[in-house]
Amino acid sequence: MASHRPARGPPRRNSPSQRRNPGDTAEAGDRSGVSAARIPQNGPVMNYQSRPPAARIRPYLSAERLAPYQLATGGDPEKALLLYEWNAQVGAAFLEILGHLEIVLRNALDRQLQIWHDAQGLPGRWYDDPLGVFDPHRRDDVSTARQRLQRDGKSETPGRIIAELSFGFWRFLLGSHYQNSLWAHAFPGLQPQRRADVYDLVDAHSRLRNRIAHHEPVHQLDLARHHEDVLRLAGYVDADVRAWIASVSRVGDVLASRP
């Protein structure tokens, strides 16, 4: 004989006072020591409720490192730490799209430079530099790339050499020194083609990336303009590349969550 179980009622729902959305602020009496007014309402979800007070973290970050953030927040240590955390978040978001941009740029330049090289009937790859166009530093960059591959036991292929060359290498190839030799028309979206327009953007992106990589403050920069410049440079290569980078970028959301 089948057993009879009491029918289950509808699932229990928390009352409005019990529900909390990811963007909700912490309670004013939260044991973290961070007041509700100081916690951003939107943007990346962070566990502010369990975070220790800024006074406990400050010695490990150093007063010198936090000084620019305290200056920007009127000397409030909690707000300074929030801004420091946000600075790291926006830097990480920029590194993502700058990484995409670097790969797109170096592949576009490699393609055009190989066309330039082949059109002159030269053997091998353009970075072999049979005409001696490179300055000593660029030749050293290529030599170092080859040494890294040998050290890691990897065979040399064009793709591996290109990947080993730093962003600075490509920036220098866009410099005025190579105006009449290596300047490559890899940017069909830029009309008229002006080397300086590309160089200035690449140089600015390189400087921003270096600041982020060295954990320096970037919160004081015009980051919305930097974001648009990344997309603009991507558009010089291809409109679809710009649309793709824009679709994956988190920068806009992080900028909107600034504490």
Image: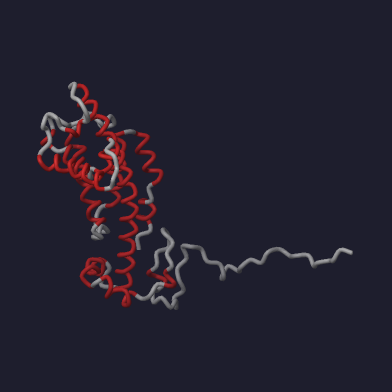
- Left or right: 244 as drawn, with respect to 127: right
Quadrant of the image occupied by residue 82: bottom left
Residue 106 picture location, percent across and down:
26, 38
Residue 76 picture location, percent across and down:
29, 73
Q: Nearer the viewer, residue 75 or 201?
A: 201
- Left or right: 44 as drawn, with respect to 163: right
Quadrant of the image occupied by residue 17: bottom right
The image shows a total of numbered marks equal to 0
Residue at horizontal 14%, vertical 30%? 130
Q: Name the quadrant of the N terminus.
A: bottom right
Please say if 150 is above or below 48: above
Residue at horizontal 26%, vertical 52%? 222
Q: Name the quadrant of the C terminus.
A: bottom left
Quadrant of the image occupied by residue 193: top left
Residue at horizontal 30%, vertical 37%? 159
Residue 217 picture location, percent across and down:
24, 60
Residue 149 picture location, percent across and down:
26, 44
Q: Nearer the viewer, residue 151 or 63?
A: 151
Residue at horizontal 28%, vertical 73%? 60
